[in-house]
Image: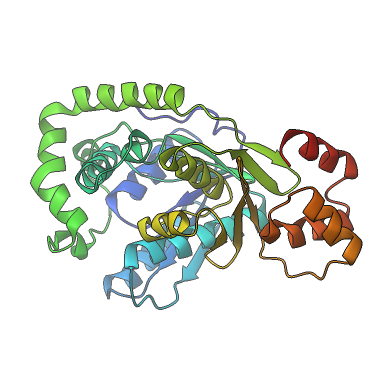
Amino acid sequence: MIFLQDLEGKKNLLGFSGGPDSTALFFCLLEEGIDFDMGIVDYGLREQSIKEVAYAKELAACYQKRLFIHQALGIVRDFEHQARVQRYGFFERIIKEEGYENLLLAHHLNDRLEWFIMQLCKGSGLNNLLGFRRREEREGYVIVRPLLEISKDQILEMVRKRVYFEDSSNENTRIWRNKIRKNYANSLIQEHAKGITKTLGYLQEEQERLYLRQISQVSEIFYFKKSNDLSNLDCIDKILKKMGYVLSAPQRQEILKQNYDGIIAGKYLLSSNEGWIFLTSGNVSKSMDRSFREWARSMRIPKRLRPKIAWLLEQGKLKKEQMNFLQKRIF
């Protein structure tokens, strides 16, 4: 089933690559009369990328779509993670500048099973096993994956008479994800697509019941009650995804090592006290007068969080009434 609900009448941005998946989604949206524009990232690592960008330009001109192109900065290590950071950063900038409501991505059933198997092999809890969802709310926009229950074979059939480009690097089985895809995921989907779709759906429902934890927000500060490490990391991951950032496995380990007190990716501030964990954007460096420092100390506000609170109060983004509420509930 292809999910196109809630896209009509909205401002949609399609993450396009020129591959079969995003090409299938492009023409599917076109056929259903869904309005959208396109964004493409050129990593400049393959000669074929020039043709992929040219194809995106051709489609945009032919079907009167706006096209946004990003030339990626050089990536020297941890390519998959860094590429994702650049890609989402580009999309979010365009979304913010142009007022898009939805980011449409062409992830499909095979992608989801690949992720599941990879996390299973690494050792993961239920939340990380499932990975991405069909609909994910982020800060200021929604990620929608209309093809998440469609198999790769179905997608290839959809684009059988269309032009598209295959990424030759996907054939390199020295890359773990490609090995998982070629040796396990594709054959499992071919034989058991319906059962796998049902299982992932059941697990999603169970995940939503098991991981139902309240994440609260006051001004720009998110906070939640401390629990076990797995559950804490899940909440941190959800908040960061909402703000447009995806944690890597080493970052998750570093968070535990720092006992929930540190700076993530140079721009997200994480802090905690005896019972609560706090997360906010912006590593604010602000001088605080003596009266504020004494007040913050008496409130038992975590040290790392104090400059941000001082700044929010100064900017009028945080009211005294809100601080009184936090004092009664948390500090």
Q: Which percent across, then down, holds residue 26? A: 41, 45
Q: Would residue 162 be seen by someone viewing this image from the given angle?
A: yes
Q: Residue at x 53, y 57 (%)?
A: 91
Q: Which percent across, then down, holds residue 221? A: 69, 48
Q: Is residue 91 above or below residue 120?
A: below
Q: Would residue 57 be seen by someone viewing this image from the given angle?
A: no
Q: Residue at x 27, y 36 (%)?
A: 109
Q: Residue at x 32, y 21 (%)?
A: 202
Q: How is the image coloured?
A: rainbow
Q: How many marks?
A: 0
Q: Is residue 226 above or below residue 57?
A: above
Q: Which percent across, then down, holds residue 245? A: 51, 55
Of 52 and 194, which appears nearest the observer? 194
Q: Which percent across, then down, holds residue 183? A: 8, 47
Left or right? Give the position of 147 relative to 5. Answer: left
Left or right? Give the position of 291 relative to 15. Answer: right
Left or right? Give the position of 88 relative to 293. Answer: left
The answer to which image quadrant residue 275 occupies is top right
Q: Residue at x 34, y 72 (%)?
A: 50
Of 146 and 32, which appears nearest the observer? 146
Image quadrant occupied by the N terminus: top left
Q: Is residue 321 above or below residue 81?
A: above
Left or right? Give the position of 55 relative to 270. Answer: left
The answer to which image quadrant residue 217 occupies is top right
Image quadrant occupied by the C terminus: top right
Of 240 and 188, which appears nearest the observer? 240
